[in-house]
């Protein structure tokens, strides 16, 4: 493998598009990113306060209702606003830069954005008013004010418009470039759009047919098992929706930023297709501890969950190989010498390295979560909180930062005033995340449970947890400092001299000329997703209609609080 | 001249070798889980057994007289607990160490969940269903049994005690019941 980089003259990259041509979608992309990062900053403040509230120290304004209001807002802001708006903004950027032509459906993009903004404001005001403290995962038969759900539905509708724009832009390009391979970054973005359309079916059905009618008072009872099953349809795939941009950066940005080439374009396409296939029929692993499903279907979805680790393991290898090419091209020698030779001062390279470390811990924890029997040891404990903070908050979000840093000069026409401050921000995020989540893993194994506003530290078992909760609070504070640094870096105050840059993606060692139709579109894969979903979720959903269980009485959380 | 076909084939070969390794790794993990499931009976608490949340306290298994720990005529130990906003009924249960215990839970209102600290006992309690866990406690002493699923503003106060006593101290009364009091 080493000899590939050392011995072969690599093909000359294709000519970059003419510099100086501004992006047509520049304002659209920036609007999405700023909304995402504003929500992110607020959510970081809330997150740090929540950890303070759970610690043995006295936190200000610490009441149960404030705590659950805060957790709801933190979850909604991070999981629905930061992720969705970042992904949409990045998608528009990729569509224009990877395809090398102006966005045709720019106006639709703005419609999607403003519908999303209205939705975010509705949901946020509902939560702040205290009438929607149901967390971002809903938990019927508890219901919030309908405004909360309708707001979130609007965010999803905005994202559906984005999906339509992404699919349309790719098909226009394919029509104009018959037989050509869709650039990998765009191929992956459309894979994510297609996956997201499938993903949202579950939660949309739950909200439209069960939760919203209940919260409006039209229905008095709800089938809780069915609602949990429909939400599980969405609950795992949504995580891969968030993850896609990080993987797009690994494949199409990091290799070039590190000074090398992508080891294999084909492996990238395969990984993104595997994500599309295996992100969806696996959500029941969130229901391993639930009574309403048989062990047989839990087992089936566990096996499929194991398969979703395959694209990640392929990615780790391909990206490590791509970075090795870069390291050796930069003169690195020996088994590990290439690691030292990598340009660690480059934010994308640094973020990729740090993301992989967090992926190692978070992914390892995830393998335990998916293990059917071992899940009983950690279900609904801080272990799980640690797992998804490492994977989403760590690996994924640090790559969101890296992507923003990589494309910011081409969006704003200015360089960063201090790359050192950029690197500090990334390091602090990594350190904060590790300091916060390592104690959570330990506490989870000791049985510290989730979603609690306060612990009774006079209990002898709980008392021993106190010092570790304080350590993780310190981690949270470090994360907050990093979040503030991010905003400083991205604001005009953090930018330096003017520049004209056109973003260029990584070239593969062997750039794909033509690829098989199966690796250049999604028709075949959609059929396979449908088959897998029918196998994995057909009966588990049908059983609620074939043999209906007793329903639960709706509990209106928004009533009586005026 | 450089033979690009050769490097391409080499890349493909390396990737395929890694893919085979990954496939092997995943199968190993699945094998370990299946082995644990079959030989050590480590399985998730699946139990499609219905109970109406509106009436469960009025008649049948989860009426007041049946709650807590009881030993039936053939010596089987069963502990029944209602998880409700925002407490467990009863708040304290006694179980014998080193004996199979069946824990049964039901909710009359919203979703709850339980774990027992220091053990692998863990299940969601979903209104409409009886959740059931079979276990054997090996350590004696008072263990925490919190509600681990968000069930409303009082969720944090929802905490019960599981008192594990040595087998010789586990003495059922004439009605077959054992209580904390």
Image: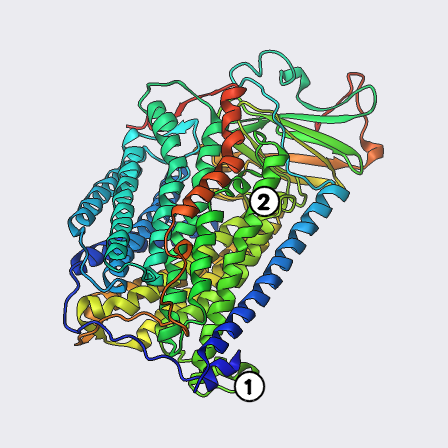
Secondary structure beneath dot 2 equals helix
Name the image quarter holding the C terminus of chain B: top right
Q: Which mark is residue A62?
A: none
- How far apart in space, not on screen, are marks 1 and 2 (Cα)? 40 Å
Percent position of residue A195, x then y = 39, 47
Q: Which residue is mark 2?
A: A302
Task: Please tell me whether residue A225 is drawn above or below residue B56 in the rendered image.
Answer: below
Residue, x 29% and y 49% (percent of image)? A167
Is disc 1 placed on a helix, strand or loop? helix
Q: Position of residue A369 (x, y in %)?
A: 57, 49
Of A294 and B86, the residue lying toward us: A294
Where does label 1 land, which residue?
A334
Specify the subunit that label 1 lies on: A
Rendered image quadrant of residue B64: top right
Q: Is residue A301 above or below residue A479?
A: above
Examine the rendering and report whether any part of residue A74 can be seen.
no
**Proximity of marks 1 and 2: CB atoms separated by less than 8 Å:** no
Residue sitting at the far top: B59
Q: Do circles 1 and 2 both sit on a common chain?
A: yes
Compared with residue A499, is residue A221 higher up or lower down, i.e. above or below? above
Scheme of image coloration: rainbow
Identify the residue shown where x is 74% and y is 42%. B38
Depth order, front residue of A391/A47: A391
Residue A213 lies in quadrant: top left
Viewer-side residue, B178 vs A405: A405
Percent across and percent down for residue B65 are 67, 16
Label 2 neighbour load within 10 Å: few <14, some 14-19, many 20+: many
């Amino acid at each position: 493998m080493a000899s590939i980089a050392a011995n072969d003259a690599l093909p000359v990259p294709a000519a970059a598009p003419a510099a100086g041509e501004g992006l047509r979608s520049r304002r659209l992309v920036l609007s999405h990113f700023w909304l995402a990062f504003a929500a992110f900053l607020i959510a970081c403040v809330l997150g740090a306060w929540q950890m303070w509230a759970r610690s043995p120290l006295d936190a200000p304004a610490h009441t149960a209702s404030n705590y659950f209001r805060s957790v709801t807002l933190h979850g909604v802001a991070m999981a629905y606003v930061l992720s969705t708006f970042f992904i949409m903004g990045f998608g528009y950027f990729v569509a224009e830069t990877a395809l090398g032509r102006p966005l045709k459906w720019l106006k639709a993009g703005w419609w999607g954005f403003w519908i999303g903004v209205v939705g975010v404001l509705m949901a946020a005001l509902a939560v702040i008013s205290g009438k929607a403290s149901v967390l971002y995962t809903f938990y019927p038969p508890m219901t919030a004010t309908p405004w909360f759900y309708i707001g979130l539905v609007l965010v999803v509708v905005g994202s559906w418009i984005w999906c339509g724009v992404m699919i349309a832009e790719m098909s226009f390009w394919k029509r104009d470039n018959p037989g050509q391979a869709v650039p990998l970054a765009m191929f992956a973005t459309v894979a994510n759009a297609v996956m997201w359309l499938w993903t949202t079916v579950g939660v949309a059905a739950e909200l439209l047919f069960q939760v919203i009618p209940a919260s409006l008072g039209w229905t008095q009872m709800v089938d809780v098992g069915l609602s949990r099953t429909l939400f599980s349809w969405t609950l795992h795939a949504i995580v891969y929706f968030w993850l896609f941009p990080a993987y797009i950066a690994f494949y199409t940005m990091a290799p070039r930023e590190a000074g090398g080439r992508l080891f294999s374009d084909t492996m990238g396409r395969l990984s993104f297709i595997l994500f599309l296939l295996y992100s969806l029929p696996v959500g029941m692993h969130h229901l391993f501890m639930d009574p309403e499903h048989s062990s047989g279907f839990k087992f089936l979805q566990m096996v499929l969950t194991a398969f979703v680790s395959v694209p990640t393991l392929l990615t780790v290898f391909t990206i490590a190989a791509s970075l090795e090419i870069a390291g050796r091209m930069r003169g690195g020698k020996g088994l590990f010498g290439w690691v030292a030779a990598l340009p660690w001062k480059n934010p994308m390279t640094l973020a990729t390295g740090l993301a992989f470390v967090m992926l190692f811990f978070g992914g390892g924890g995830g393998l335990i979560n998916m293990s059917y029997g071992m899940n009983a040891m950690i279900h609904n404990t801080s272990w799980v909180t640690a797992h998804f903070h490492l994977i989403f908050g760590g690996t994924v979000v640090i790559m969101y930062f890296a992507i923003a840093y990589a494309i910011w000069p081409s969006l704003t026409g200015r360089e960063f005033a201090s790359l050192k401050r950029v690197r500090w921000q990334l390091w602090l995020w990594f350190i904060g995340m590790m300091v916060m989540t390592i104690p959570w893993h330990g506490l989870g194994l000791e049985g510290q449970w989730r979603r609690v506003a306060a612990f009774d530290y006079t209990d002898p078992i709980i008392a021993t947890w106190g010092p570790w909760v304080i350590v993780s609070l310190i981690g949270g504070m470090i994360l907050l400092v990093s979040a503030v640094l991010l905003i400083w870096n991205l604001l005009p105050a953090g930018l330096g001299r003017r520049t004209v840059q056109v973003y260029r993606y990584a070239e593969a060692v062997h750039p794909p000329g033509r690829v098989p139709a199966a690796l250049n579109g999604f028709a075949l894969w959609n059929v396979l997703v449908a088959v897998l979903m029918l196998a994995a979720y057909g009966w588990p959903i049908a059983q609620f209609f074939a043999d209906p269980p007793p329903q639960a009485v709706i509990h209106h959380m928004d009533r009586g609080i005026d | 001249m450089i033979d690009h076909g050769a490097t391409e084939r080499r890349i493909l070969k390396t990737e395929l070798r890694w893919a085979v390794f990954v496939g092997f790794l995943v199968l190993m993990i699945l094998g370990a889980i299946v082995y644990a499931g079959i030989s050590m009976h480590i399985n998730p608490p699946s139990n499609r057994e219905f109970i109406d949340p509106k009436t469960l306290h009025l008649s049948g298994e989860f009426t007041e007289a049946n709650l807590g720990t009881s030993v039936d005529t053939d010596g089987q130990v069963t502990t029944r607990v209602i998880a409700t906003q925002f407490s467990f009924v009863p708040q304290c249960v006694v179980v014998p160490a080193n004996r199979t215990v069946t824990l049964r839970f039901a909710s009359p209102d919203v979703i709850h969940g339980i774990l027992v600290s220091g053990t692998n006992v863990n299940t969601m309690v979903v209104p409409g269903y009886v959740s059931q866990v079979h276990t054997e406690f090996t350590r004696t002493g008072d263990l925490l049994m919190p509600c681990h699923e968000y069930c409303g503003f009082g969720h944090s106060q929802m905490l019960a005690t599981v008192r594990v006593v040595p087998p010789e101290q586990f003495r059922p009364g004439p009605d077959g019941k054992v209580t904390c009091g």
